[in-house]
Image (tube, grey):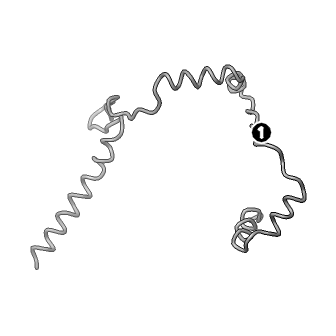
Amino acid sequence: MRFDKFALATVAVISTLALPGLAQAASIYHATGGEAGFTYHPDHATNGKARAEVLAELEAARKDGTLALIQRGAPLPIKNAGPAKTRQQVIDEMRNESPEQRRARMELTAGG
């Protein structure tokens, strides 16, 4: 019985000491002792988008004018999602919503 408690404690200590190292392995910066404080490992970086994808997005932003707006710090225009609902359509939706939907809507619009 004593051996089981000792083994469990040993596993807990080893796990506690190993977890920060495992989390660090996914980072491009690794902590080191000494004056530097960290080392840089670019090969540990995860690849996001390919260069061609980024260039295609950049060209699309140039064509539709959003790149110029971003460079000037101007707000981006909101894309039109289609025709707006009429007043009667909104009222009909509110009358036909379930109690759960009404409660969720009331929570969203409450001032608290």
Q: Is residue 46 above or below residue 106?
A: above
Name the residue type under label 1.
Asn
| Residue furthest right in the image | 87
Left or right of 20: which side holds 66?
right
Q: Residue at x 63, y 23 (%)?
A: 60
Q: Is residue 64 above or below residue 98?
A: above
Q: Looking at the image, which is closer to me, 8 or 81? A: 81
Snapshot quadrant of residue 30: top left
Looking at the rendered structure, the number of numbered marks drawn on it comes to 1
Q: Position of residue 101 (x, y in %)?
A: 71, 68
Specify few, some or many for label 1: CA neighbours under 10 Å numbering under 14, 14-19, or 20 or more.
few
Q: Residue at x 69, y 72 (%)?
A: 100
Snapshot quadrant of residue 29: top left
Residue marked by disc 1: 80
Left or right of 9: which side holds 36?
right
Snapshot quadrant of residue 106: bottom right
- Is label 1 in a helix, a strand or a loop? loop
Q: Quadrant of the C terminus?
A: bottom right
Q: Is residue 70 above or below residue 13?
A: above
Left or right of 36: which side holds 111?
right
Q: Looking at the image, which is closer to me, 96 or 74? A: 96
Q: Is residue 37 above or below residue 65?
A: below
Q: Position of residue 85 (x, y in %)?
A: 84, 52
| Residue furthest bottom in the image | 1
Q: Quadrant of the N terminus?
A: bottom left
Q: Position of residue 99 (x, y in %)?
A: 73, 74
